[in-house]
Image (tube, rainbow, N blue to C red):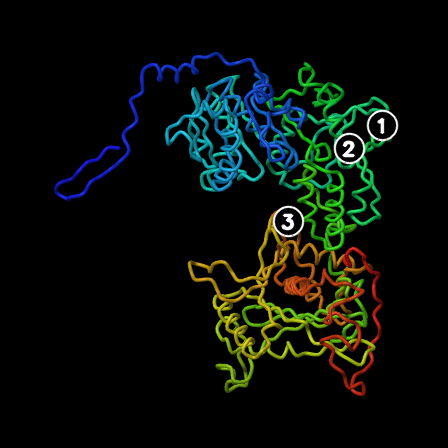
Amino acid sequence: MVEITDARLGAGLTFAPLPPLATPQELLADALPVLDPPSRMSVTAAAERYVRIQTQGAWQSFDRAQTPYMVEPTDMTQSRMFKAVAFAGPSQSGKTKMLETVAFHAITCDQRPVLIVHMTKGDRDKWVEEKLDPTIQNSPELFDRLGRARDDSTFGRKRFRGMRLTIGYPTPTILSGGTYGMVLLTDLDHMPLVLGGADNPEGSPFRMAMQRIKTYLSRGCVLAEGSPAFPVTDPSWRPRPEAPHEMPPVAGGIMMLYNQGTRARWYWECRDCGEEFEPRFDYLVYDAALDPGEAGETAEMACPHCGACLDHRHKVEMNRAALAGRGGWRHEGTEGQLVSIDDDAIRKSNIASYALNGAAATFANWRDLVANYEEARRRAETLGDDSELAGVHYTEIGISHRRLKMGDGDEIGVQFLRDHMQDTPRGIAPEWTRFITISVDVQKTYFPVQVTAWGEDGTAQVVDRFDLTQPPAGAPNAEPDAEGNRRRLDPSRYVEDWQVLEPLADRVVPVAGAEYGLKPIGVVVDFQGQPGVSDNAEAFLVGRRRANQGTRWRLSRGQGGWRVPFRIKYEAPERGSKGKAARQIKLLTMATDRLKDTIDAALRKSAGGAGALFLAAWMTDEDQVGEYCAEERLAAGWDKKQGVTRNEGLDLSVQARALAEHKGLLRINPDSPPSWALGGPGNANAVPLDVTKTAPAPRAAKPTTINFLKR
């Protein structure tokens, strides 16, 4: 240690001694690897010699037999025939490990600068800390080449003898400067389509990456990998005979690169007939009539040529046999034939592209794959919400999602809804009703209100629909003027106007053919609107709590887009708008576009079937009926059709559905329903009626049930 005494301050300073000066021999030893010629060792062979990976908690040598389908795509990054390699596949199939081994090859065998681009800064830091650093530290050959200075190993940079490894995220700055021999893009579909913004677009991450390797001529390469995350843009697309491996068109991402490249698929050789076939999810055979878990237990892979079936236990054997030459990667030829990578007839492209189906992935279990698919498919068919099915397609099967057809036509209209209206009186719930919801929208000068009756199987019917337009007595400026005119409601200005909603919580809706009516299980009110609406809505809810009715009221807000990770959630906001403090109330947040899919599917079922949403014949106003089909499904979400001004019916139905699911609609056990969903006067919200004053209403036929909702 070195100690320095400062007499003026009377204090002693102690610090570690400086490191010794580097000798010329050390500097030369560090620089010599730059002069080494590139090794002719393939990436896979180098990984087996130099890299150790964690397997079942232990660090072991890299083994190509673990993921045989990764050998060719990995080794093609060193080929001078292609400028890029694109790999599309499900999650947990070995894609990221392929990217790592390519980077490690540049450290040990072919020293040149490498850039790795992760999705975001946070994901990059997490990956470096949890994946990259442990691999380097547990691989002696890699760790020996790593610099020992403090700045030689950071989240954004690793300095090795003879090369540097830069780890960034997709920004114009990172992809606009620098010269690299290799650029590696991970999870491409979760990167922005275009970098630089709308005002100064600079290009896609892939195109910008291609500019960074130009100096290295044919030695430069871009590797892009990822799971698909973009839906099919043309639902009517069908494969062409001359392009047997082509994927459906998408707006961007890894599947777009795959279609531009050589389009390789992984093939097995059938043990019975000797023909090659692609092990795809749609070649799995199972009993779809069983529950999802039981169906998964029966899954087998069927050869499309002879029908012979393979159990899941044979998958490892078939993958390794394909690596040995009995199958493997088959690329498209110039005339649509299937060829190997070294065939002169291969499709002309500077991208070697690969797509792996999840059924062949090492870490995918057919039982779980089928079970998850069936759960998501049945949910999509029942609720019209195919977000979970899309997730199975993207992350587990590794293909682009194509939306299920929900009906014969592309959209429903007013005439369809009129043709299937129920002949029930206004204000009377059908005899199959188990509970009531009331939903309230907030407009500039009125409150649109909808009363909805619900069955235990998700069937619903609009019981009443009206607008509240007049302020309550005692509200500011509510008295009529000299000419007898009264002002309309102003929810954004007067909190007192919200008092017109108070009677809704105590409304009793008679049930057809019964001597009782039902109070609503809750009233949900829109939280968003003109400036001032949210403040008044919060004040109204606080007032209902003080009146001991807080559990019967909910405030809702919508969140649009297809990538919302939930259908509904009930929690306090994490932050306020425009820098304000977060509100101290809970909000029922709705994924509006996903719920509108459900409402659209329910309206289509009004021709028959459980889970339907029925309108009633008393709705004679065509404009009011048109509110339920006022929007169309677009790529970015649901939006009003051209020329349409009112869509309150659809919004109110979305709120009603969100409240019903929040209360537990999808969790109702028909053999033991909760007290609020009981049939008969024993219902927790049932109120006896004076039968002498209540006219009997005609019974509405109850549709058949869907067992999937009961599980």
User: In the image, is residue 488 above or below residue 323?
Assistant: below
Q: Which residue is denoted by mark 1 in the rendering?
A: 305
In-image side of 271 versus 377 (left or right): right
- Determine the image quadrant of residue 678: bottom right
Within 10 angstroms of label 3, few (less than 14), some, or many (20 or more) residues?
few
Can residue 627 be seen from the camera position used here?
no
Within 10 angstroms of label 1, few (less than 14), some, or many (20 or more) residues?
few
- Residue 573 in the image: x percent, y percent? 51, 60
Q: Secondary structure at mark 1?
A: loop
Q: Secondary structure at mark 3?
A: strand
In space, the residues marked 2 and 3 are separated at their CA atoms by: 43 Å
- Residue 218 in the image: x percent, y percent? 53, 17
Total labels: the figure holds: 3
Residue drawn at point x = 70 percent, y = 27 percent: 265
Mark closest to the chain's N terminus, 2 or 3 = 2
Mark closest to the chain's N terminus, 1 or 3 = 1
**Residue 634: image tag:** 3
Query: Which mark's residue is nearer the viewer, 1 or 3?
Result: 1
Q: Secondary structure at mark 2?
A: helix
